[in-house]
Image (cartoon, grey):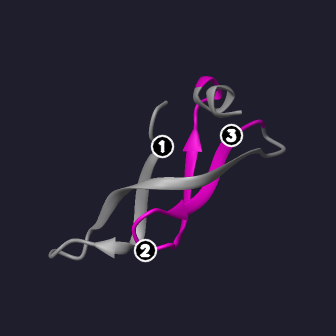
């Protein structure tokens, strides 16, 4: 994965829909059910971002 992109709830288009932005400083975590996720900051506005990942994508980021 070159650039990790996720929906940013602060960066919205003219129709008030969230837009895909690049995530900076991603931190991969695994919950007790075995599901991987990543948290980071929006490169555009600095807001918090969250995304669920597959196991293969999570291991590529680690």
> Would residue 44 appear left or right of 47 to someone viewing this image?
left
- Which SS class for mark 2? loop
The residue lying at 58 percent from left, 29 percent from top is 57
Residue drawn where x is 63% and y is 56% of the image:
39
For discs 2 and 3, the disc positioned in front in the rendered view: 2
Mark 2 to mark 3 CA distance (whole Å) = 25 Å
Residue to which mark 2 is pinned: 45
Residue 3 image point, x, y percent: 44, 40
Q: What whole-number distance in Å separates the C-alpha atoms at marks 1 and 2? A: 16 Å
Q: Is residue 40 above or below residue 32?
A: below
Q: Is residue 40 left or right of residue 8?
A: right
| Label 1 vs 2, first from the N-terminus | 1
Other-residue count near label 1 (Cα within 10 Å), few / some / many at <14 / 14–19 / ≥20: some
Tell me where residue 44 sits by quadrant: bottom left
3 and 1 marks in contact (CB < 8 Å)? no
Residue, disc 1: 4
Crowdedness near tag 2: few (<14), some (14–19) or many (≥20) residues, C-alpha within 10 Å = few
- Give the structural element (helix, strand or loop) at label 3: strand
Assess whether residue 62 is covered by the magenta stretch: no
Q: Is residue 37 magenta?
A: yes
Q: Position of residue 13 (x, y in %)?
A: 21, 71
Mark 2 and mark 3 in contact? Answer it, CB < 8 Å. Answer: no
Residue marked by disc 3? 36
Along the polypeptide, which appears first: circle 3 or circle 1? 1
Residue at the farthest left position:
14
Percent position (x, y) of residue 52?
57, 45
Crowd class of label 3 (few under 14; some 14 to 19; many from 20; radius 10 Å): some
Start-end of magenta stretch? 34-56
Q: Is residue 35 left or right of residue 4?
A: right
Q: Tell me where residue 38 appears, x and y as whole percent.
A: 63, 49
């Amino acid at each position: 994965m070159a650039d990790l992109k996720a929906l940013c709830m602060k960066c919205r288009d003219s129709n008030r829909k969230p837009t895909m932005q690049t995530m900076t400083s991603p931190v991969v975590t695994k919950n007790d059910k075995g599901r991987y996720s990543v948290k980071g900051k929006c490169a555009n506005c600095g807001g918090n971002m969250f995304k669920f990942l597959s196991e293969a994508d999570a291991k590529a980021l680690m």
